[in-house]
Amino acid sequence: MSQHTRKEDLSACRQLIKHGSHSFFMASLLLPPKISVPATALYAFCRIADDLIDADNAGDAAIQALYARLDAIYAGTPGPQPEDRALAEVVSNFAIPRAMPDALIEGLAWDASGRNYETLSELYDYAARVAGCVGAMMTLIMGTTDCRAVARACDLGVAMQLTNISRDIGEDARMGRLYLPRRWFAQAGIDPEQWLENPVQHPAVTAMCQRLLSYANVLYKRADSGIALLPLNCRAGIRAARVIYSDIGRQIASQGFETIEKRAIVPRSRKSMLLAKALLTVPLRSPARSQDQLEWPPLVETQYLLEDIETVPAVPRTEWLITLFQTLEERDKEVQQRQTTSRAHDSQAASSESASTQVSSSKENIVP
C-alpha cells in the first residue's frame, strides 16, 4: 500500500470526526499534530463503533464484530477499514491497555441490550465505559501517565457523558431509551415505563435534568485541576473540549432544563469564541483552590481504568507520525515482497510448463 493511501486513511478519520463529532473536531484544532492525529484516529474508531450499535437491528452480532476488530487491531493485523488501521498504530505506539477500548465496547453492549440504570452509580458505570475510558486513552496519547491526571481525565469524560444524556433525554426517550436513574422516577412517583410510552416535559423530569447537570458540573470542576498536569501544548485543546461541552449545559439551563422537545445546541460562532477563550486561559499550574480536587481519588466507577496505568512504558510520543509511517511501510514491504516472491514462483512454474510443452511437441515431430 502506498504512503498516499496511508495518508488517506488518516484523512478519512479526520473527515469522519469533522462531520460526526463537531465539538471534538473544533477542540482538536488547538492540539499539536503529534497529538491531534492519533487522537482523531481514536475518536474515529469510537464514532464508528457507536454508529454500528445505533444502526437498525444492531445486537450481539455487532458487538462480537467489534470485539473481533479489536482483536485484530491488538494483534497488529487490522482490517481494511481506515479507522482500524490507524487505531492499530495508536494502541501499539502509545501502549494503550486493552482494558480501555474493551470498556468502550462493553458500554456499547449495554446500549444494544437496553440495559436499565437504577441508581446514579450505575449510570456512572455506563459513563465510565463509553466516555471515561476515552479520557484515559487521550491522557496516554498525550504522554501523561500520572494517575491523578488520568483520574481527572476520566472525570471529564463522565461529565461530558452526563451532559450528553441531559441534552438527549427527549430524543432517547422517543427511541425507548432511558438513562436517567429510574430510582429518581420512583422518588417522584412516576412509572418510567409509562412515561416512556408518552415522553412529555414533566416538572419532575425537568428537575432530574437539572440535578444530573449539577453532578456534571462538579466533575467538570474536578477535571479542571488535572489539565495543568498535561503537556503545555495540549492544555488549550483539552480546556476547549471542556468549556464547549459544559456550555451545552449552560444552553440547557437557559431553556429551563427542558430537553424533551428542545435539543440544546451551541452555535458554531459561540464554539469559536470558546476556543479563543480556552487559548487565552491555559492553566500553567493547578490553582491552589483545586489542589485538594487534584488529590481526590478517582470515582469508584472509573477506578478499574487506572489499574494498568503504572505498567505503561515511556514512548517517544513526539515521533508518533514518523513511527506510524515507518511501521506501515515495513508492513507493506513485507506484503509486497511476499507478492513478488509468489509471482516469481508462478512465473517460473509457467515457464517450466511451457518448456515441457515445447519439448513434447518436438518429440511428436521427430517420432515417425
Image (tube, rainbow, N blue to C red):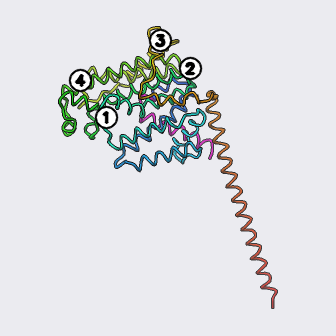
Distance of label 4 from label 1 (alpha carbons): 18 Å
Disc with the residue nearer the chain's start (2 vs 1): 1
Residue type, mark 2 in image: Pro
* Coordinates of residue 287 in the picture (x, y in percent): 47, 10
Q: Residue at x 55, y 17 (%)?
A: 232
Q: Amino acid at mark 1?
A: Tyr
Q: Horizontal and vertical percent for residue 57?
A: 34, 49
Q: Is residue 17 magenta?
A: yes
Horizontally, is 281 left or right of 120 in the view? right
Residue type, label 3: Gln
Nearer to us: label 4 or label 1: 1
Residue at 28 percent of width and 22 percent of height: 211
Chain part drawn in magenta = 1-24
Task: Please indicate whether residue 75 sits to the left or right of residue 17 in the image.
Answer: right
Q: Are marks 4 and 2 in contact (CB under 8 Å)?
A: no
Q: Is residue 328 visible?
A: yes
Residue identifier under label 3: 291
Apparent side of residue 286 relative to residue 348 in the rendered image (left or right): left
Mark 2 Cα within 10 Å, few/some/many (few <14, many 20+)? some
Q: CA distance from mark 3 to mark 1?
A: 33 Å
Mark positioned earlier in the residue sequence (4 or 2): 4
